[in-house]
Amino acid sequence: MNTPDKTTEHKVIPIVVAAPPAPASPTAPMIRTLGLVSAICGLIIVGAYQGTYDAVAANKRIATERAVFKVIPAAKSIAEYVALPAGGIEPRVGAGDTAPGGVKFFAAYDADGKLAGIAAEGGAKGYADTVRIMFGYSPDCQCVVGIGVVAMRETPGIGDKIVTDKNFLANFNALDVKLKGDLSALANEVRAVKHGAKTSPWQVDAIAGATITSRAVGRAINDSAQVLLPRLVPNLDKLRSKS
Amino acid sequence: MNPSTAVTWDEFMEGVWRQNPVFVMVLGMCPTLAVTVSVVNALSMGVSTMLVLIASCGLVSMMRKITPKEVRIAVYIVIIATFVTVVDYAIQAISLTLYDALGAFIQLIVVNCIILGRAEAHAAKNPPLPAMINAAGMGVGFTIGLLALGTVREVLGAGTLFGVTLFGVGFQPWVIMVLPPGGFFVLGAWLLFFSWLERRKLRRRQAKLVEATQNA
Amino acid sequence: MHESAFQIFINALLANNFVLAMFLGLCPFLGVSGRLDTAFPMGVATTFVMLVASLCAYGLNLLLSAFHLEFLRLISYIVIIASAVQLVEMVLKKYSPKLFRALGIYLPLITTNCAVLGVALFQTAREYDFVQSVTFSVGGGAGFTLALVLMASVRERLTLSNVPDLAQGTALSLMLAGILSLSFMGFAGLGG
């Protein structure tokens, strides 16, 4: 910083004064630097976002497809829909976030273009963090036909048994999720019960020693189904064949 | 080796050993303990942090002459956050499974004390190339620290290495190792080990000195 | 998600304690927990910053989502946090200079405290609404303070005990933290 006036001033004034504090940087360079940094960083971020957008979208699509095909084995293609808060469904366009209150689900079609099942995601807090699962729903039996774990951070060897334990997974071969007569909610709440205490087709037999994670799976299905199915079931005919 | 290359090798090794961020400076603890449940995760986190370190120190160094003192921390933070965002999207584009495994800790690289500390202590005072080499050294040191932890925790806690099962069916994994307390214990154990090494070195040096004075 | 505010609070405080289970806020945890009289004010100051950060992050997220600028999330969160810490510093300096001096260098270091940015990031990832976010940040801060106070109390006791020289310092703190973390695992499932 060039402040020749100040230095000559000090030479001229013969009074001995304590050295003044170093002059604060003038605001112009500060604003200029901040502006320059923001511009550069903004460009870098936008560039990275655009550059990776397609790859990220492809990855997400592949992951979703894999999850849906796992829970509905007969599926050959999927179409994404949103169940609207006011009832009714519409195809989902674009990859942005769903409108508030809307629930995403996937209609899975078999090789002949007929509806093989519906798949939807649900999540609930497990032991360590959220357990996110994808479950498959069959309109014909009004039941859940399979689950797949999308993301979880449960204890290895204990909580992660929900992926491997055959008896636990058998809970979801025909989990009853029928709706009440007025189609406003599930007839019976889906929840996990203590290992060995299952009596009804809408209960989930928890894994012994992994109750918290098992309960999370039950809650995930329940919370998701309670919102999705009342909106979905009245509109099932629209989905019967691939449009 | 001519002096300038000697200087740069030294700069690099400083971060790797003498000032290892994990074992010596004990900085950047949060990702160190959270992510090291497996070697793959540890390696990915280490490499990501190193890339952010190099890029941020490079840019900070390039801008050092025009960054006024008062706004320097804000500038450093913005630069670091930018490169962390880039790495965040890059990992998503490479592997969503890895992204899920590392979770929020990728974005938490922003507040990793190592990077801000390096930028302030070194990159702001040196030209870009030495700054980036030093940053690379720190990054490698950090990665080594993470790997040391990750290996122990994965082998003991899951019986695998890089996902490859090591032991037979009879092996009972020591699950606590991959849980939070295990992280604390393993790092504490490593620090104990290095402390013991230091003491042994010191004792030997003292013994040599005593011998030398006796023989003189 | 459908967690109640009470569940979120209890979880953040005990079962998923920010420091002992989620590994957030470790640098100050190991650095400031030597003495009880600095540990507690540090915890409170951090809780306050976490609350402010949570509120700002909630608002910022709404704003950014409305304009589809999600990629600016991280950078805007951290800038807001840095500003919030500056604000707290100025307020403390003016109204409680003694506390300001006692906390010293650790006050600006709250900016790089993973717990503060962690609150903002986790509440965004879990899509908490306003009430959930506030209870999450207050619970998290309370959990941080709890862990800090527990650690400080034990460490103060330990300075009077016979600890082998080899283990002094950070190694000991880490072993302590491990035992604390182990005991906190007993709270699992408390939040339902």
Image (spheres, helix red, strand yellow):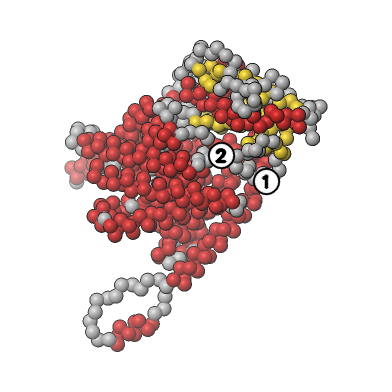
**C67, A48: nearer the viewer:** C67
| Residue C95 image offset from top left, x and y in percent | 28, 57
Residue B99: numbered disc: 2
Q: What residue type is labelled 1?
A: Asp
Residue drawn at (49%, 64%), measured in percent from left and top?
A34
From the viewer's perspective, tell me whether residue B182 is left or right of residue B81.
left
Marked residue chain, label 1:
A
Residue drawn at (64%, 52%), measured in percent from left and top?
A50
Residue A94 visible in the current orientation? yes
Q: What residue type is labelled 2?
A: Tyr
**A127, B167: nearer the viewer:** A127
Q: In this view, does B31 lie above or below A207?
A: below
Q: Is residue A64 above or below residue A94?
A: above
Q: Name the residue under label 1.
A: A54
**C4, A95: nearer the viewer:** C4
Q: In this view, does B131 lie above or below A215?
A: below
Residue C26 visible in the current orientation? no
- Asked which quadrant contains residue A113, the reply is top right
Residues tagged by mark 1 and mark 2 found on one chain of the structure? no
| Residue B128 image offset from top left, x and y in percent | 49, 60
| Residue A231 image offset from top left, x and y in percent | 66, 32
From the viewer's perspective, tell me whether residue B22 is left or right of residue A33.
left
**A25, A83: nearer the viewer:** A83
| Residue C36 image offset from top left, x and y in percent | 24, 42
Question: Is the N terminus of chain A in the top left, top right, bottom left or bottom right quadrant?
Answer: bottom left
From the viewer's perspective, tell me whether residue C86 is left or right of residue A116.
left
